Image: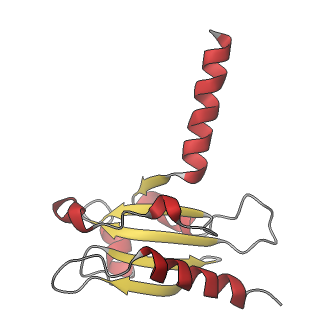
Amino acid sequence: MKKILVLVTLMGLFINSYGQEYITDSKFEEAIHEKSSFGDDETSIIVIEFWAKFNEVNSFSDWSKLKGVTHYYRVDIAKAPIAKKDYRVRMAPTLIIFKDGIKEVVFKAGLDLECPVDLDELQEAIDELKKASQF
């Protein structure tokens, strides 16, 4: 029983560390300022997807394949009106890349409401941000 409990706990930590989480206004600022688990000197790259239940078919689906990201969050626009307003989100999905808590790159859906970016484009933007922070 003890081994099962340890295994379940470790699986939860693994999923939580590398998986995607939903956040609301109450956790938004904390989330975008999250630091990398590799140390304080590591650049922190956070990807936020503003998401809507009615358009989940067009949400970004390759989040588990992203590299160099500290964390990836989804924000349900119905549950985060303050963040939606602060970041001028008009369409869902909208993806925003934050580097060390600062908004760097925004990908907004058009009137067709399709995901505005694919894995390669998003990964390229992340890689450019990481490269720009190297000396």
Q: Residue furthest top?
A: 1
Residue 52 placement, left or right of 70 = left
Compared across the picture, whether 103 is left or right of 99 comes to: left
Could you tell whether 47 is left or right of 129 in the image?
Answer: left
Q: How did the renderer colour the structure?
A: secondary structure
Q: Is residue 122 left or right of residue 69?
A: left
Determine the residue positioned at 34% across, 70% down.
50
What is the x, y in percent for residue 126? 58, 80
**Can residue 116 be seen from the camera position used here?**
yes
Quadrant in the picture for the C terminus: bottom right
Task: Give x and y (percent) for residue 88.
Answer: 33, 84
State the residue at coordinates (46%, 63%): 63
Is residue 102 visible to the viewer in this orientation of the structure? no
Where residue 74 appears, x then y in whole percent? Answer: 40, 61
Q: Quadrant of residue 26?
A: bottom left
- The N terminus - image quarter: top right
Residue beneath the point at 24% across and 68% down: 58
